[in-house]
Image (spheres, rainbow, N blue to C red):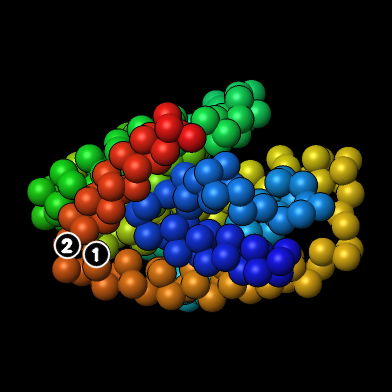
Amino acid sequence: MSILSAVILGVIQGVAEFLPISSSGHLAIAQNLLGLKIEGSTDGTFDVLLHLGTLIAVFVAYWPDIVDMIREFFLGVKDIARGTTPTPVPPNRRMILLLIIGTLPLFVIVPIKDYIERLSANTIVVGCALLITGVLLFFSDRYNRGKKNAGSVPLRDVLVIGVAQAFATIPGLSRSGTTVSVGCFLGLDRRFALRYSFLMSIPAVLGANILNLKDIVDTGVDMTLLPAYISGVVTAAVLGYLSIRLLKFVTEKGKFGAFSYYCWAVGALTIIASILL
């Protein structure tokens, strides 16, 4: 049963992490309303591993961009040492700065991390957050003609997107849906908004996992659950990669409407079930 539960949770994480329907919200629903948990596992351990799986998916999907940014980082350091600045600045070199600025707001919520995590147990909050996600997605379809990209987006815009990402730590608010929608509202090219959102997830997920490492060390890891852990990680990685490919296709078409209706339906059902059960 543990392996089956791990695979199901891996499917939820892999699909909902990148499709704009909130993985945290769906995991909270599965665990609190459906009772789907890994017996003997601490929530923190498996949560970290599931996010590791989806992080692998981002690295695979955006590997050329990541390699180029690493190269541009060292070239930038070399240029600084020489006192030279290329004109114009290469897009992926500027992207490094954009990612740093977009990640800064997450540091503000570190002191209240435990409080935000406890919200997962309140499925009414999760349901309401899913309704809000639906609203953001619905209106983002009407703001999908922006032209701003890595070379032209103002730094204040990416800071606003970073603040949106910080709010999206609330279970039920989709991180990808919130950041892409806010990016569209600010006039970003929709494809660039999606690419920026996914790349911005790398430092966000890495940072969250580092914060959770202490809890894992304190509680220890049950090695008998290793097959379940591996099953969950592999499932999350594979489904995560496929979800990224699907969302790229949907973004090209500029249609998030179906996701908004889905979020409204699941959010409403979650609230009703929370009241009745």
Most foreground residue, 92 or 102: 102
Most foreground residue, 6 or 141: 6
- Secondary structure beneath dot 2 equals loop
Q: Which mark is residue 251?
A: 1
Residue 151 shows in this picture: no
The quadrant in which residue 134 appears is top left
The quadrant in which residue 95 appears is bottom left
Q: Residue at x 81, y 41 (%)?
A: 214
Most foreground residue, 150 or 43: 43
Q: Residue at x 17, y 61 (%)?
A: 255
Q: Which mark is residue 196?
A: none
Would residue 239 appear left or right of 187 to someone viewing this image? Answer: right
Would residue 121 appear left or right of 142 to someone viewing this image? Answer: right
Write down the residue under mark 2. Answer: 254
- Secondary structure beneath dot 1 equals helix
Circles 2, 1 touching at the beta carbon (< 8 Å): yes
